Image (cartoon, rainbow, N blue to C red):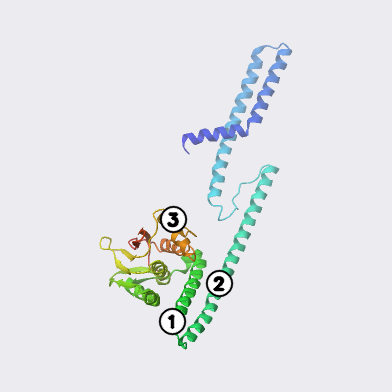
Amino acid sequence: MNKSFNWFMLYSYIREKLKTIVAFFIFILIFFTVYLLYHLTLEPVLYAILLTCTLAFLFMLYDFYRFYNKHLYLKDILNGIDEKLDNLPETKTLIEKDYKNIIKALYKSNLELEHKLSNNRSEMIDYYTMWVHQIKTPISALHMILQSMDSNEYKKIMNQELFKIEQYAEMVLHYIRLGSMSSDLMLEEYYLNDILHEVVKKYSIIFINKKIALDLEKIDYKIVTDEKWLTFVLEQILSNALKYTHEGKISIYMDKENKDTLIIKDTGIGISEEDIFRVFEKGFTGYNGRMDKKSTGIGLYLCKKILNNLSNDIFINSDIGKGTKVAIDFSRKDIEIH
């Protein structure tokens, strides 16, 4: 405890005991007045007052010492409040006992609420997980129907829309699992090039339909990551690049200056300067997102959260009308294979 805090403690103690202190001095005044009324000599009066004040002062020192230690003890309990409340100090008065009972009741109620919320979340995750798996059945059926259709134009449009449905279903699943991501991680060493090729292969239908060129450099880089979560991040970034790029190309390469940084660059419509600092906010769509009318504002938010949990960073630079460059920094090494 520093000196300033000791003075604050003393001030707090005096405020708490102010009524007792005032009552004490009133009694001393009564004591002194009675002696004067009976015309007693001053010396025994002053001696009695001095003796009483000395004993009162010693008692206050002892009482302040107990007050001070009790405060420190309660602070220690507060720091460990998430563990248990068994170490609450013994109650001396009925009011203290009432406060102790209130604290225990609130603590118990909080534990029950946490347990209930945990169960509700678990049930929600189970439901949406089941929902995602169930929705894949009609999607697969539609794919089979499309294979038997004759019109290539209709097939192209429906394939693209089916692909979007699959992506939105995957986004729901990752969104609800984000809260328990730490327990879901499976960290291993991967070649980044292999993961990127699978992501690009998945989006090949969009590249073909929109006639967007792809410049994917061979990337000889190993990372320790969770393949499922990183794949989702790369898919979201590539999906955004394709959504807002109407002509030109998308380039994927490792930064020449920062060898641990992956770059995904497009020649799309870009992001305005006032929006660039808010693109990772939950639900923020920005001007281009509002123009699109279908943007959820969740994709980049999820990317930022996931990459933080994977000990990676993400940055975005953009110019309106020229395109957007997304950089993923894999240089942080505070993640290990389990």
Front of the two marks 1 and 2: 1
Return the residue nearer the eye: 180 or 318. 318
Q: Is residue 122 left or right of residue 284?
A: right
Res. 26 image quadrant: top right
Return the residue nearer the eye: 247 or 181. 247
Question: Measured from the top left, where is residue 301 in percent x and y?
Answer: 45, 61
Find disc 3 in the rendering and name its residue.
Answer: 278
SS class, disc 3: helix
The earlier-in-sequence mark between 3 and 1 is 1
Return the residue nearer the eye: 181 or 255. 255
The earlier-in-sequence mark between 1 and 2 is 2
Residues tagged 1 and 2 counted as in contact (Cβ below 8 A):
no
Find disc 1 in the rendering and name its residue.
Answer: 153
Q: Is residue 53 above or below residue 166?
A: above
Disc 3 packing (10 Å; few <14; some 14–19; many ≥20): some
Front of the two marks 2 and 3: 3
Q: Is residue 157 left or right of residue 72?
A: left
Tell me the kind of residue under disc 2.
Tyr
